[in-house]
Image: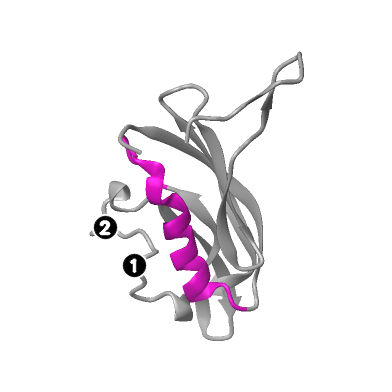
Amino acid sequence: MGYNSSLEGEITFTPPIPWSELQGSAFVRTPERREYERLVWLRMVEETVETDEGTLTRKHAVAIRPSEGDELRAGKLAHEVQEIVSKHGAGRTFEGFILVRGEESPDLWRVTVEAGKAIEVIPRIVWPDGTEETPYR
C-alpha cells in the first residue's frame, strides 16, 4: 500500500506473556522506540502486588495493539502480527482483530490470528441487487 491507513482494535491473548519472556523484546514499546517504528506493539499491563518482602510491580503483555503513529502504511501488518505470534504464541489463544481503513473507499480489511497464523480478512461487498464488488486491496 502506498498511502496511509488508520488502524483500530486489538488482538488479545491468553495466558498473558510474563515480563521474563519480554525483557529486551523489539515488540515492547519503550521511550527509545518510536511509536511509528512498528505497525503493532504488545499492550503491557502493570499490576501492584503486596508480598512479604514489600510492594512488587508485575508487568505482562495482554494484547497486540496497533501503533498510534500517524501516516501508517499497513501493507506489512499481517507480517508484523505474525512475528509476535511466532515468537510468543505457543500455548496461547488469540481473539479479536485489527481493523484497517485505507484512504480510498472501499479499502477496508482486518488482520486476525487463526490456528497460529496471522491472516488478512477481506470483506465481501454485496449490492442490493445481489452483485458483488471486490474491495480495493
Q: CA distance from mark 2 to mark 1?
A: 9 Å
Whether 75 is drawn above or below 64: the answer is: above
Label 1 sits on residue:
26
Task: Mark 1: give few (<14), some (14-19) or many (20+) Cα within 10 Å.
Answer: few
Mark earlier in primary sequence (2, 1): 1
Q: Of helix, strand and loop, which one carries label 1?
A: loop
- What's the colour scheme? one colour
Tell me where residue 64 appears, x and y as whole percent. Answer: 52, 56
Residue lying at 71% horizontally and 21% vertically, measured from the top left = 131
With 88 as the anchor, is 70 left or right in this view? left
Tell me where residue 86 appears, x and y as whole percent. Answer: 50, 72
Tell me where residue 103 appears, x and y as whole percent. Answer: 40, 25
Q: Residue furthest left?
A: 32
- Inspect the image, locate mark 2, and give the three-letter code of the amino acid beneath it: Arg
Residue lying at 42% horizontally and 58% vertically, measured from the top left = 80
Along the line of sight, the residue nearer the viewer: 77 or 122:
122
Q: Point out the image quarter for the N terminus.
A: top left
Asked if residue 23 can be seen in this view, the reply is yes
Label 2 sits on residue:
33
- Inspect the image, locate mark 1, and give the three-letter code of the amino acid beneath it: Ala
| Picture quadrant of residue 14 | bottom right
Q: Residue furthest bottom?
A: 53
User: Do tag 2 and tag 1 residues touch (Cβ < 8 Å)?
Assistant: yes
Q: Which residues are magenta?
A: 67-90
